[in-house]
């Protein structure tokens, strides 16, 4: 039973890491990255559809994204969706493809983005610590019901702490990698 609680906790912590990576992929770095458009939905025959499902998105140059719609009639809808997504991007259409040029980040912008990354990472660390607290509470209930001994409670609490340390280190690694990408000129 306590092993199942630990496994559940580890799954939840892994889910937090995956969510962190998705959220960090939306933060702009100095390079053009197609994942910036993840979550942008365009109207496609009356249905909101992710852009990456109705067009191919590539980065032919470090500062530019190229979007080729599979269906040319969706070109204007894609442009409109990018403009409405409030990503501070300016899509330019030539009738067949859409180009988005990324201006170089200023030092001040890089520092602000770096602060954002740190704040996001801290929120995820708090989430992971909350999962640990949850696990320990479940172990205390088991001990209270005499399902495990006091020594087992202590051992399982230590295991929960080791899991927490492992996943908070992963959060720190992800944040450090993203900060390095942002500060890279």
Image (tube, rainbow, N blue to C red):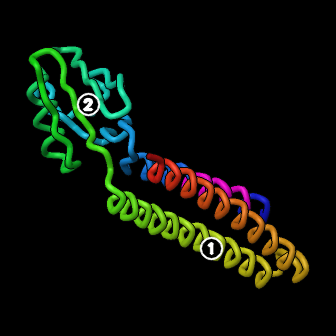
**Taking 111 as reference, is 154 left or right?**
right
Label 1, on which residue?
134
Residue 88: x, y in percent?
20, 49
For the residue pair 65 and 110, the one nearer the viewer reads as 110
Q: How many marks?
A: 2
Q: Earlier in the sequence, mark 2 or mark 1?
A: 2
Q: At 27% across and 24% down in the image, what residue appears?
A: 66
122 shown above or below 172: below
Determine if the magenta segment contains residue 8: yes
Residue 115: x, y in percent?
42, 67
User: Tag 2: Cα neighbours inside 10 Å, few (<14), some, or many (≥20)?
Assistant: many
Magenta extent: 6-16
**Taking 3 as reference, is 83 left or right?**
left
Q: At 53% across and 52% down in the image, what residue appears?
A: 180
Residue 56: x, y in percent?
31, 21
Q: At 83% across and 78% down in the image, what residue appears?
A: 153
């Amino acid at each position: 039973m306590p092993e199942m609680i630990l496994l559940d906790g580890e799954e939840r912590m892994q889910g937090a890491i995956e969510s962190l990576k998705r959220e960090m992929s939306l933060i702009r770095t100095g390079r053009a990255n197609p994942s910036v458009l993840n979550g942008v939905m365009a109207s496609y025959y009356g249905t909101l559809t992710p852009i990456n499902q109705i067009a191919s998105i590539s980065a032919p140059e470090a500062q530019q994204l190229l979007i080729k719609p599979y269906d040319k009639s969706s070109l204007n809808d894609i442009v409109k969706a990018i403009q409405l997504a409030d990503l501070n991007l300016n899509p330019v259409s030539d009738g067949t493809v859409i180009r988005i040029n990324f201006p170089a980040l200023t030092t001040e912008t890089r520092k602000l983005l770096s602060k954002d990354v740190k704040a996001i990472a801290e929120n995820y660390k708090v989430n992971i610590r909350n999962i640990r607290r949850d696990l320990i509470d479940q172990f205390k209930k088991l001990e209270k019901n005499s399902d495990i001994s006091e020594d087992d409670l202590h051992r399982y609490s230590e295991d929960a702490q080791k899991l927490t340390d492992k996943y908070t280190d992963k959060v720190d690694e992800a944040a450090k990698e993203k900060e390095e990408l942002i500060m890279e000129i």
